[in-house]
Amino acid sequence: GRGAGGRRMERPPEPRTLPRTPTAAMQIRHMEENDPPVRLIAIGPVYRRDNLDLTHTPMFHQCEGLVVGSHITLADLKGTLISMARALFGESQDVRFRPSFFPYTEPSAEVDIRCIRCQGAGCAICKHTGWLEILGSGMVHPSVFEYVGYDPDQVTGFAFGMGLERVAILKWDVDDIRLFYENDVRFL
């Protein structure tokens, strides 16, 4: 376009990135429309600016869980996630929680399982640490409850999220995440 005096006006640059599109929006919408208690699993696509490689893709499917009610504790979060990890990867599976940061939970933790390939000895899959990260989690921050109209003095809760393809890679020993998107009938 042209500005005053006929000068050509420069357009602002187009954004070159897409904000993360997590399924957490489903959790917020549910809480805005429903009173506690809440027990919710939300599954959907997520888009990230990740480079395509054996374990990363710019689009994957996220599974998020949310539990809200009176007297929900960190022990409830840990018990739930340990039970889930053992149901997925075996009853004797070792599970650990590492402190982390997520904007809407406090405290927050990454959840790791003992490497299923090397049983903790160290290999290329676990980058020689003996552990594999499977999900992020934490106690819902009180400001989230205030935003959706819940009283943070009356309710507490926890949330977690994990990439479904990454869990499938570990559970069924898939070598390359790209196989999920190539439509090879032999693999599917």
Image (cartoon, rainbow, N blue to C red):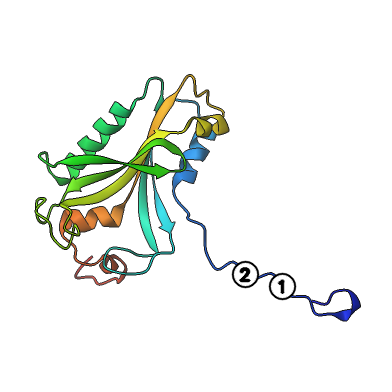
Residue 125, quarter of the rendered image: bottom left
Q: Which residue is depicted at the point 19% across and 57% down?
A: 126
Q: Is residue 171 above or below residue 142?
A: below
Residue 187, quarter of the rendered image: bottom left
Classify mark 2: helix, strand or loop.
loop
Direction from residue 21 to residue 43 in the image, left or right: left
Q: Distance between the residues labelled 1 and 2?
A: 8 Å
Q: Is residue 169 above or below residue 53?
A: above
Classify mark 1: helix, strand or loop.
loop
Question: Residue 54's spot in the image, x, y percent?
Answer: 26, 67
Q: Which of 100 and 167 is in front in this view?
A: 100
> Which quadrant, please, contains the C terminus?
bottom left
Q: Of the numbered discs in the image, which one, if any, rests on residue 14?
A: 2
Identify which amino acid the numbered label 2 is placed on. Answer: Glu
Report the residue marked by disc 1: 11
Identify which amino acid the numbered label 1 is placed on. Answer: Arg
Question: Residue 173's spot in the image, x, y percent?
Answer: 15, 60
Mark 1 in CB contact with mark 2 (< 8 angstroms)? yes
For label 2, count other residues whose C-alpha is less than 10 Å away and answer few (under 14), some (14-19) or many (20+).
Answer: few
Q: In this view, does 76 lie above or below 165?
A: above
Q: Which residue is depicted at the point 49% across and 45% down?
A: 25
Q: Which residue is depicted at the point 38% across and 20% down?
A: 71
Direction from residue 158 to residue 146 in the image, left or right: right
Q: Nearer the viewer, residue 164 or 100?
A: 100
